[in-house]
Amino acid sequence: MGVKTITVTEEAYKMLAKEKKEDESFSEVIKRLTKERGKLSDSLGAWKMTDQEAQEFFSSLKRHWKKSTVRIRGKAEHS
């Protein structure tokens, strides 16, 4: 099996190192994590929606953010 060299940020390296078991190589860590958690694309950017669905989604978020902000400000004023 061939070998590839990849570049990762220091932060990503530390996160990967935390996942590493005592006698495990970084390649084994990556294979284990991707097997356990599935393909990265299954979690990132996999949600496809129409422009109309996106507008409805963000409109709903905006309404709820507004309601939450009003509620939080109201609680802060009564404290």
Image: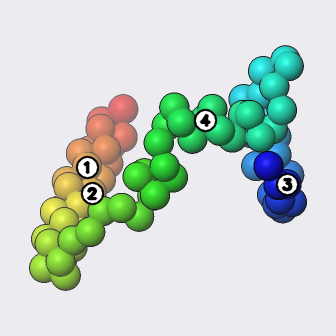
Circle 3/circle 4 CB separation < 8 Å: no
Q: Sequence order check: which comes first, mark 4 or mark 1?
A: 4
Q: CA distance from mark 4 to mark 2?
A: 34 Å
Identify the element where label 4 is drawn.
helix
Q: CA distance from mark 2 to mark 1?
A: 5 Å
Question: How far across and how far down the image is residue 28, in percent?
Answer: 74, 34
- Rate crowding at label 1 as few (under 14), some (14 to 19) or many (20 or more) other CA atoms within 10 Å: few
Of circles 2 and 3, the one toward us is 3
Question: What quarter of the picture does the C terminus occupy?
Answer: top left
Q: Sequence order check: which comes first, mark 3 or mark 4?
A: 3
Residue at 26%, 69% in the rendered image: 48
Question: How far across and how far down the image is residue 53, in percent?
Answer: 14, 72
Q: CA distance from mark 2 to mark 3?
A: 48 Å
Tell me if residue 69 comes above or below residue 15 in the rendering: below
Residue type at mark 3 is: Val
The residue that label 1 is drawn on is 68
The residue that label 4 is drawn on is 33
